[in-house]
Amino acid sequence: MERFITKENLIRLAEELTATCRVLAPVASCGTVTFRRFLPGMVLDMHSRMAAVSPKAATFPQTETLLTVKREIPEKKPEITETLPEGKNVVIGCRPCGARGKLIFNPVYETDKTKDPYYIQRRDNTVFISLACDRPETTCFCHSVGSGPADPQGSDVLLTLVGEGYVARSVTPAGEEVMKSALFADAGDKGKEADAKNVRARELMGEAHDYASAPAKLLARFDDMDFWQAQSAKCISCGACTYMCPTCYCFNITDDDLGLESRRIRSWDNCMSHTFTLEGSGHNPRPTKAHRLKNRVGHKFSYYPDLHKGVIACCGCGRCIKQCPAGVDIRQIVNAAQEYSE
Amino acid sequence: MSQLDDLKNAIKSRLGELECVIGWEQGYDPLHATPLFIRTEADLDRLIIGPLAVHNLATYLPGFKGKKIGVVVKGCDSKSVIQLLNENLINRDDVVVFGLCCDGVVSQRKIRAALPADPGFVESVEVGAQDLKISVAGQSATLKLSDVLADKCLICATPDAIISDVLIGAAHTPAPAASLACQDEFEAKSDAEKLAFWQETMSRCIRCYACRNACPMCVCRDHCIATSRDPLWISQDNSPAENMMFQMVHVSHLAGRCTECGECERACPVDIPLMLLRRFMNKQVKDVFELQAGTALEQTPPLLTFKVEEERINERGW
Amino acid sequence: MPAQDVRELRIVGFLCNWCSYGGADTAGVSRFTQPTDLRVIRVPCSGRIDPLFIVRSLMNGADGVLVSGCHPRDCHYAEGNFYARRRLEMLKRFLPITGIDARRFEYTWVSASEGQRWQHVVTEFTRRIHELGPAPTFNPASEADWNTLAVQAGQGQTCPCHG
């Protein structure tokens, strides 16, 4: 289905949806653009640039309560309440790379053997209305990892900016439902302009880099700690890259106790942190940042593709590069492994 | 001979005896530099300096303890080197300091605000003596350096490295502003306004610890109490209270040690104005102990010592 | 003297074992009455107190925090309270920038024989906290509060606060 919606009407749509759903949209506040819970009265900022944080919080929030435990008195059996997510979510104005994170999560969070009810509930009740990109940033490389500036995979509706509004194309039945709103109008022949824009955006990205040899080449560097020490020299081992990434999916489960009540929470974990693999005995199989960077890059471009039919666990959004305080560039690292010769 | 050539020659003459020299090179796009670890003369060719070289390289020094290395520092960075020396976190004999006389560095946020399109679309940058000629998303803009200098440069009293084995560049007579308008305005707000500000700002925080890891004085890194499970200081919960608790931990541990290099604020991926807290804490340290971290060698950090009679602490007569 | 308010507020006290805890004991033995809002945590020395104890208490919802130790120059361990004096003074001066009312934290020195002084300190501090009222929680109290804050902040990219 192809329709057209003006910029004002998109904001009106967002405002209308807040009545029945949690709406996540890029909001500008205090000098930056992040995905926030959108409320009427906020300034939506879809165009100045890609949001600093990815929209992954819609399906995988940074902190979520898995269950709560209450004890009336110590002798009585504690009351355990599972807290599954409820309600519907809509993400408006993310980029195709942001919506694509789902594709990396799905083979891990929904398998034949295990199904994560928290993630699945959210994923099945979240609609992604993505905005195709007009031009790439210097850190964009979605075209090299199987995606592109107008990639519909992962989105439910794909918008392309044409004039003072957007050509909207549905990708899934859920997307079609949203597009039935009266705020959408006939697209006329604007579809052609949208196509031209999408093609132009892809052209501006230039040639894609071929990562086909990356899995094997990275594995070949596995024991080469000199290589990883050189690559990780400027890394400060923080976690900005992991938390910004739309495809990073590791989590931690901890219990918060307060008197007679307890809350089990799941929170984002970060493989660049020292405590990620710290064992109870004090032993740490990844004691240095070189080990940890090797794991992060290896996981995304080698181990995950080997386990999941060659899909690279990266959407090419480039947030890890531009948000890194030291400018570590994952493209350079993988490239260095691919071009490594003794 | 330019300042860069002088620097390269100075480094070349010492490179042989050093594990490496830490400097900067061109980063992932024309507007960004990135740290460079120089081990060979080929590496040395890639060295750059200038207003884009924002990183405080002193933060890497404690990691090299036991090895002999060199580091290129601007005025603000040299204060971090001094503070690290004062706390015995590095040995003077193991560090060769190549000091620069700095003209200031840019704030990427100010550049973003001044350009007609997002700097992510930058195509080319020409760094002049007084300005930056930037081409971005097919449009051109010339930005005056004085308009996009980082806040810390506006109040900088030490643009020339105050500790160095070699000092390179033309000396400056600093004329810093007395204080920053943004700091004064914020301090003048009421408690309720400030609380609301931090409540909202801390809801953006994702607790990535980029601020902590970028800080040259934060050396506990892997063993930081913020991420310890036993004792548990801060919950994994990403609520504003827990996020603010981390800032309280960080600033408390920096009291009397923070050299105001601003790396924490620069590193923050969601633009939280962390320096508001640290500049304020430093004002209190200056008021009570008449000390500024990193300004002189052989200075014991004030909270690591005491005086029996404290001139500027009211003994709380009740 | 009863508490000013029927409702008791949550005031946490960190008392050093030798002087202040002894002083509180003396006050009790002498039957000096004082408000019961204050809940005491005994530490060996005021120098044991990490300023973060106070911060954590306030962030966890304490309405007030009182620290009391030996008088400087009289520390049971000779130097502990000299360090405490510096650390706690810095904390007291730092609180205003965070929006937390610095009057909710106080540190003082009470010796083991100063029962009457202890009564005065507790009564005064409790009165002050009651005047200030319950402390605002750092996490916004309700969804509505939260939404108001969020809308106010989500007004665009101008931020005068930093560069």
Image (spheres, coloured by chain):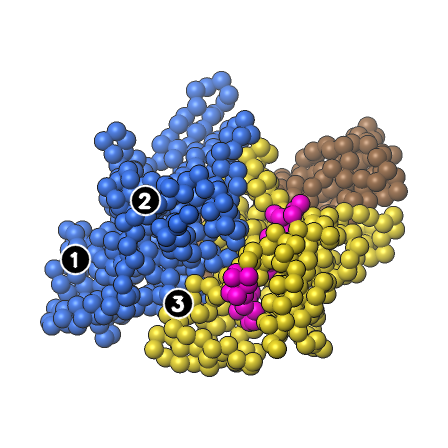
Chain colours: A blue, B yellow, C brown
Q: CA distance from mark 1 to mark 2?
A: 34 Å
Does residue B50 belong to the magenta stretch? yes
Q: Earlier in the sequence, mark 1 or mark 2?
A: 1
In this rendering, do the residues under marks 1 and 3 share a single chain?
no
Give SS at disc 1. Answer: strand
Residue B84: percent from the left, percent from the top? 69, 53
Foreground tag (2 vs 3)? 2
* Above/below status of B293 relative to C21: below
Side of B304 relative to A285 (left or right) = right
Q: CA distance from mark 2 to mark 3?
A: 29 Å
Which of B67 and A324 lies nearest the eye of the viewer?
A: B67
Specify the amino acid type for callout 1: Ser
Specify the amino acid type for callout 2: Pro
**Magenta residues (range):** B41-67
- Residue B57 seen by the camera: yes
Residue at left 46%, top 55%? A328
Residue A170 has which mark? 1
Q: Are there few (<14), some (14-19), or many (20+) residues within 10 Å of tag 3?
A: many
Residue A215 has which mark? 2
Q: Which residue is mark 3?
A: B120
- Rendered image quadrant of residue A3: bottom left
Residue A329: percent from the left, percent from the top? 42, 56
